[in-house]
Image: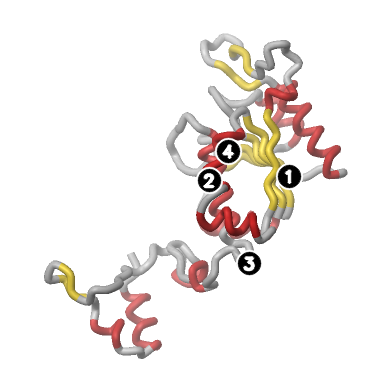
Amino acid sequence: MKIHIITIFPESFESYFSSSIIWKALKKWLFDVYFYKLNNFSTNKTKRVDDKAYWMHWQVICAEPLKKAIDHIFDKVWKKIPILYTSPSWELLNQKKIEDFHKDLKEFIVICGHYEGIDERIIKIYDIKKVSIWEYVISSWELASMVFIDGLVRHIPWVLWNKKSLEEDSFSKKFSRQKEYPLYTKPKEFHWLIVPEVLFWWNHKEIEKWKINNLF
């Protein structure tokens, strides 16, 4: 999988891509990520990429630098690839949609908007698909992109060391998209609360029943 990220703030991704599971996956070449600083495609001497929305008081990312950045990526990879844009005003992501994206997307562009968003004409010109991580607004569109990318990358084979981590996740197909069962570890008793006895029986059928009966 190859991910091309257009952003004003590529430095926002540094800690995310240099730690934990994502960092290990990059080191193993399980996926690649490329950054494009939008300001480098500005036609403005100050490298500014935003302007006031018509009849509004807030700022919007201009169409011209975005188009130049997208066309640059198309030229670089020698083909047109899907473009996604994280926006709170669109269809909400869920586990099934993440799984579908993983099946369909091998190489794609993610646009990180900023301020109030991007010029609508870019979305129409390139038939961009919007995705929303939930029904709220955050200041960092980069953060929204990280949430989407994280949900996607963990489905790449060998990113997670144990395949069951995907099979038995909250909202997984195995559990009919319900939330995961309770989890316990040592000690067996803590503050007078005891781990369910069935988890010590080594009876896989009974444990599977317990899991299904204790989904949230």
Q: Are marks 4 and 2 in contact (CB under 8 Å)?
A: no
Which of labels 3 and 4 is toward the front?
3
**Residue holding disc 4:** 86
Q: Position of residue 14 (x, y in %)?
A: 56, 41
Q: Looking at the image, is mark 1 or mark 2 earlier in the sequence?
A: 2
Is there a contact, CB below 8 Å, between mark 4 and mark 1?
A: no
Residue behind mark 2: 16
Give the amino acid type for the residue marked by disc 3 in the picture.
Pro
Q: CA distance from mark 2 to mark 3?
A: 20 Å
> Where is mark 3, residue-wise?
157
Query: Dot 1 corresponds to which residue?
Result: 82
Amino acid type, residue under disc 1 in the picture? Pro
Tell me which colouring the rendered structure shows: secondary structure
The earlier-in-sequence mark between 2 and 3 is 2
Residue 206: quadrant of the picture: bottom left
The mark that comes first in sequence, 4 or 2, is: 2
Horizontal arrangement in the rendering, residue 111 relative to residue 204 (left or right): right
